[in-house]
Amino acid sequence: MPKETLRMCVACRQMKDKRSLIRVVRSKDNQMVLDKSHKLNGRGAYICKDKQCFEKCIKSKALNRALKCDITDDLMNEIKKNLE
């Protein structure tokens, strides 16, 4: 039986299965993208598919710290659309 792969949400700091999280990637050329396949190369950060975690992430700038760059408003809007 395959073992689930756990990743930590940058906002709530809880470990969850990576498929239940949203992954944001900063590629080598500093492009910020939402990684729906969970397979893109680059520095990745995970956030729960939860509105409270998203709000906490914005307030604490957790994604900015995790990816070591500023997150664009367009990307934040795209993440918000993918929340459950």
Image (spheres, rainbow, N blue to C red):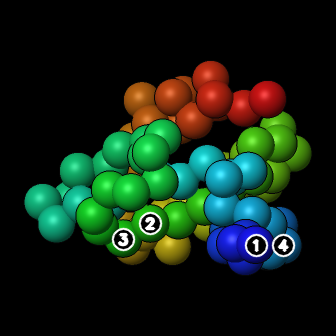
* Residue identifier under label 2: 44
Find the distance from the CA under tag 4 to the CA under tag 3. 19 Å
What amino acid is labelled 1 in the image?
Answer: Met
Find numbered disc 3 in the image and state the secondary structure of the residue it sits on.
strand
* Residue identifier under label 4: 14
Find numbered disc 1 in the image and state the secondary structure of the residue it sits on.
loop
In the rendered image, the vertical position of residue 32 relative to residue 36, given as above or below: below
* Residue identifier under label 3: 43
- Image quadrant in which you'd find residue 42: bottom left
Mark 3 crowd level (few <14, some 14–19, many ≥20, 10 Å Cα): some
Which is nearer the N-term, disc 4 or disc 3?
A: 4
Find the distance from the CA under tag 4 to the CA under tag 2. 16 Å
Find the distance from the CA under tag 2 to the CA under tag 1. 26 Å
Residue 66 visible, this orientation: yes
Find numbered disc 4 in the image and state the secondary structure of the residue it sits on.
loop
Residue lying at the far top in this picture: please name it. Answer: 81
Q: Kindly check if marks 3 and 2 are in contact, taking CB atoms under 8 A apart as contact.
A: yes
Find the distance from the CA under tag 3 to the CA under tag 2. 4 Å
